[in-house]
Amino acid sequence: MEKRGIGKIAVLLALGDGDIENLQKYYENKNYIIYRGQAGSMDSKKIIAAIETAALREDIIRENYHEEHALYHAIIEALSGYCRGQVMLGEFLRSAGLTFAIVRGTLVEDEPSSGNWIAVVLYGQIGSPRKGFEHEAIGMGIQPI
């Protein structure tokens, strides 16, 4: 099997296809720290806060400048892709309901020399805050710690 990068691991977890629990256990045994959660709002700040809170609560990052800064930039990069360039939701009369994955570990599995990184992937629905007026979207951010 080809070695996976941290981004692909996060995408697989966010998409939720297959046996997520076994995939999660497999990468946790390879020293990755993983969390999968859900968030939804018309306010991008609430989505950012939900992801940051989960990362702190699950001990993915510690309260220090370097780790919080890396996570913040990974989230903003993922939101930029998810929102197609404008990190705004309610201001554009759109809402988001998404699954997010946070993965911390080496950039490439089984390659410790690749350093310590954090990846955030957002996958879900975005669109008008009316049922049936939304579509799928995905965004990914990867930052070194």
Image: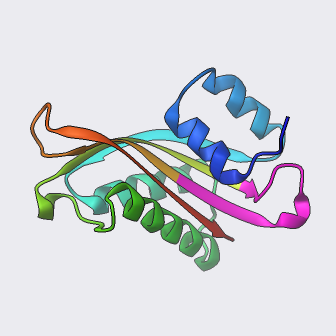
In the displayed image of the protein, which residue is found farthest to the front? 2
Q: Residue at x 16, y 52 (%)?
A: 94
Q: Quadrant of residue 136?
A: top left
In magenta stretch: residue 112: yes
Which percent across, then down, holds residue 85?
A: 33, 67
Q: Judge whether 18 appears above or below 106 on screen.
A: above
Snapshot colouring: rainbow
Q: Judge whether 26 appears above or below 111 on screen.
A: above
Q: Which residue is drawn at 62% across and 26% down?
A: 20
In the displayed image of the protein, which residue is found farthest to the bottom? 65
In magenta stretch: residue 78: no
Q: Quadrant of residue 91?
A: bottom left
Q: Which residue is drawn at 70% across and 63% down?
A: 117
Q: Quadrant of residue 40?
A: top left
Image-based side of 125 in relation to 110, left or right: left
In the displayed image of the protein, which residue is found farthest to the top? 19
Q: Quadrant of the C terminus?
A: bottom right
Which percent across, then down, holds residue 114?
A: 84, 65
Which percent across, then down, holds residue 97?
A: 29, 41
Please state the extent of the stretch shown in magenta in the rendering.
Answer: 105-120
